[in-house]
Image (tube, helix red, strand yellow):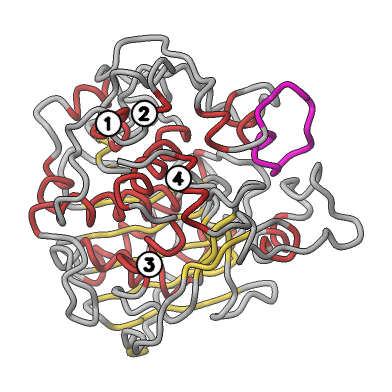
């Protein structure tokens, strides 16, 4: 197995080769690009002011999405609270939507953009990125390259002696390590914000903080035993991405291109934000176009097969994702976080909001979502710029809206 230093060498003699990213436009800087007044613009222009690397779609044909417009605006939605939106159109208008699309039985029945966003606009996915990294891990597992039950340190020896020593790849996939990591986005001293500081996504406050993704991950400490309850921690996906790179001997931009983006029939290249040595921001740095999100979501309708007919993920991986382990839901139930999904679970970097396994979610802060309803053969994607990172009324209004659309079409 190779370690992080070998990964940098694999990229090129210059670790920033192929990395793009210019300067900030007037009025936007490293301190304010994630504030509410700038989100609509900055989420669609990450490559203009931060380093990014391309995840190529390749040269093959895009999977065809046949337009078949349907009128969904008036479908009633059960309000999440008194005065909350009660129709699909009201939900879309009340949740800072940049764009949304619905694919039903292979037909694109809705595609709509707001505020200048277009079909070819690349948008920051935030933690929807995690589900893409999880899929890369799935393809590596399917190919025998990655053993999900193996210790992390068998792939990344430099994590020996760190808080992750003793954890397995499975613990990362299901966010069940015992690492101390706060995901409080409103606390500038929380680990999730310190990580952004380390990789250059936020102003550098602590000069002693490591200045790379992998350097920062090595500093994290263990607080409880590995394999315990679910706790949502972005660092789990960053370590998972590191493990995938080490197992495959290939950096994530080309790895994801080869195993995922060229095989789902993507229409546009994706990009990933990077730190100063070219390591990807795996937990939330991928940027992609709306249509390609429904293409990705379709893998979970079709037992891992893309809309082009290619098997991207094995039926076995999909089945294991849907089923979980015997204690996966119990681990979710006793999570210290306020997940508000009774009976749900988190598996292979994907959310299951209900007791069954029919509905899957890929979620990112500020309102990024892929919604997958297997019985209805429906995939919906929504890109947004909520002013706050988390907003329970907006996320559950959106889920209920997509539930209502699926029920109406069924």
Magenta residues (range): 196-210
Secondary element at tag 2: helix
10 Å neighbourhood of mark 4: few (<14), some, or many (≥20)? some
Q: Which residue is mark 3?
A: 75
Q: Residue at x 42, y 23 (%)?
A: 337
Q: Residue at x 19, y 29 (%)?
A: 329
Q: Which residue is mark 4?
A: 6
As measured in the structure, the alpha-carbon distance from the residue carrying label 1 to the one carrying label 3 is 52 Å
> Quick one: label 1 or label 4, which is nearer the N terminus?
4
Task: Examine the rendered structure and indicate whether residue 295 appears above or below residue 247.
Answer: below
Q: Which residue is mark 1?
A: 154
Marks 2 and 1: in contact by CB < 8 Å?
Answer: yes
View extreme (top): residue: 224
> Quick one: label 4 or label 2, which is nearer the N terminus?
4
As measured in the structure, the alpha-carbon distance from the residue carrying label 4 to the one carrying label 2 is 12 Å
Marks 4 and 3: in contact by CB < 8 Å?
Answer: no
Percent across and percent down for residue 198 are 66, 34
Q: Which residue is mark 2?
A: 157
Secondary element at tag 3: loop
Q: Is residue 68 left or right of residue 320?
A: right
Q: Which mark is residue 396?
A: none
Task: Considering the whole magenta stretch, tell me its main secondary structure.
Answer: loop
As measured in the structure, the alpha-carbon distance from the residue carrying label 1 to the one carrying label 2 is 6 Å
Task: Examine the rendered structure and indicate whether residue 124 appears above or below residue 195.
Answer: below
Task: Examine the rendered structure and indicate whether residue 204 appears above or below residue 315.
Answer: above
As measured in the structure, the alpha-carbon distance from the residue carrying label 3 to the one carrying label 2 is 54 Å
Q: Residue at x 50, y 25 (%)?
A: 218
> Quick one: label 3 or label 2, which is nearer the N terminus?
3
Percent across and percent down for residue 70 are 37, 83
């Amino acid at each position: 197995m190779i370690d992080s230093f070998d990964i940098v060498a694999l990229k090129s003699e210059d670790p920033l080769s192929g990395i793009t990213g210019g300067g900030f436009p007037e009025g936007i800087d490293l301190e304010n690009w994630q504030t509410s007044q700038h989100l609509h613009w900055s989420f669609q222009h990450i490559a203009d002011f931060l380093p990014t690397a391309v995840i190529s779609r390749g040269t093959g044909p895009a999977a065809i999405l046949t337009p078949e417009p349907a009128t969904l605006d008036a479908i009633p939605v059960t309000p999440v609270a008194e005065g909350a939106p009660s129709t699909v159109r009201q939900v879309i208008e009340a949740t800072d939507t940049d764009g949304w699309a619905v694919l039903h039985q292979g037909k694109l029945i809705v595609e709509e953009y707001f505020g200048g966003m277009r079909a070819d606009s690349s948008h920051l996915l935030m933690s929807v990125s995690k589900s893409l990294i999880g899929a890369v891990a799935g393809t590596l597992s399917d190919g025998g390259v990655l053993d999900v039950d193996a210790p992390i340190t068998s792939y990344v020896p430099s994590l020996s002696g760190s808080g992750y020593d003793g954890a397995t790849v499975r613990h990362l996939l299901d966010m069940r390590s015992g690492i101390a990591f706060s995901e409080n986005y409103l606390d500038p001293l929380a680990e999730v914000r310190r990580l952004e500081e380390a990789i250059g996504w936020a102003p550098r406050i602590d000069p002693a903080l490591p200045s790379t993704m992998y350097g920062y991950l090595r500093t994290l400490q263990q607080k409880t035993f590995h394999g315990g309850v679910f706790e949502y921690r972005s660092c789990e996906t960053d370590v998972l991405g590191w493990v995938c790179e080490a197992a495959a001997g290939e950096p994530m931009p080309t790895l994801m291109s080869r195993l995922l983006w060229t095989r789902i029939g993507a229409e546009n290249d994706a990009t990933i934000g990077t730190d100063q040595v070219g390591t990807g921001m795996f937990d939330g740095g991928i940027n992609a176009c709306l249509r390609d999100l429904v293409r990705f979501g379709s893998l979970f309708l079709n037992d891992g097969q893309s809309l082009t007919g290619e098997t991207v993920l094995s039926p076995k991986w999909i089945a294991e994702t849907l089923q979980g382990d015997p204690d996966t839901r119990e681990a979710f139930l006793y999570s210290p976080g306020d997940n508000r999904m009774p009976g749900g679970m988190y598996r292979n970097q994907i959310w299951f909001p209900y007791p069954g396994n029919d509905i899957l979610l890929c979620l990112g802060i500020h309102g990024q979502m892929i919604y997958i309803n297997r019985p209805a053969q429906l995939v919906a994607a929504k890109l947004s710029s909520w002013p706050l990172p988390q907003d329970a009324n907006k996320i559950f209004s959106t889920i209920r809206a997509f539930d209502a659309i699926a029920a109406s079409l069924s």
